[in-house]
Amino acid sequence: MKGEVLDGTALVMADDDTVATALEDLDEGDRLADADPPVTVAEEVPFGHKVALADIAAGEPVRKYGEVVGEASEPIARGEWVHTHNCESTRGRGDRAAAADITGSPGEDR
C-alpha cells in the first residue's frame, strides 16, 4: 500500500499532507504516536474522515493524498476533526473560477 499508516488507525499519503484519513472511528484522546510530531485526537473522528496533523489557519489549504482538497474556513487545531464544519472544498468550484475570470488573476493588467 502507498502512504503510511499511523498506529494502524489513520492513513497519510504524502509528506506534505496536513490531514490523515481515519481507517476506523477515532475517539477523543486516541494518540497517533507514529505521526511526526505525535497527535492526540481532540474529538471523535468517524471512519473515513480527516484528522488534522498540524494547526491549519483559516484560509490555508487542507492537503490530503498530496493534493489540496479544501480550505480551512476557521482555524483548525492539530488533532481536530476536519470536515464541512471547518473546511470548505475547493474542488469543482465553478463559482471561484467565474470570480477569477471577472477579477483577473493577481498582477494581470486590465
Image: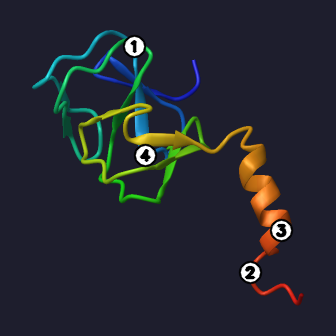
Q: What residue type is labelled 1?
A: Leu
The N terminus sits in image quarter: top right
Residue at x-position 25% and y-position 45%? 78
Q: What element carries label 2?
A: loop
Q: Dots 4 and 3: beta carbons under 8 Å?
A: no
Color style of the picture = rainbow
Mark toward the viewer: 4 or 2: 2
Mark toward the viewer: 3 or 1: 3
Query: Number of callouts in the render?
Result: 4
Residue neighbourhood size for the residue with mark 1, other residues' Cα within 10 Å, grouped as few (<14), some (14–19), many (≥20):
some
Q: Is mark 1 on a helix, strand or loop?
A: loop
Q: Can residue 16 be seen in this view?
A: no
Residue annotated with mark 2:
106
Residue annotated with mark 1:
23
Q: How far apart are marks 3 and 1 (CA)?
A: 42 Å
Mark toward the viewer: 2 or 3: 3
Q: Is mark 3 on a helix, strand or loop?
A: helix
Q: In which quarter of the image is residue 85?
A: top left
Q: Distance between the residues labelled 4 and 2?
A: 26 Å
Residue annotated with mark 3:
102
Q: Which of marks 4 and 2 is nearer the N terminus?
A: 4
The C terminus sits in image quarter: bottom right
Q: Distance between the residues labelled 2 and 3?
A: 12 Å
Mark toward the viewer: 1 or 2: 2
Q: Earlier in the sequence, mark 4 or mark 3?
A: 4
Residue annotated with mark 4:
18
Q: How far apart are marks 1 and 4 (CA)?
A: 16 Å
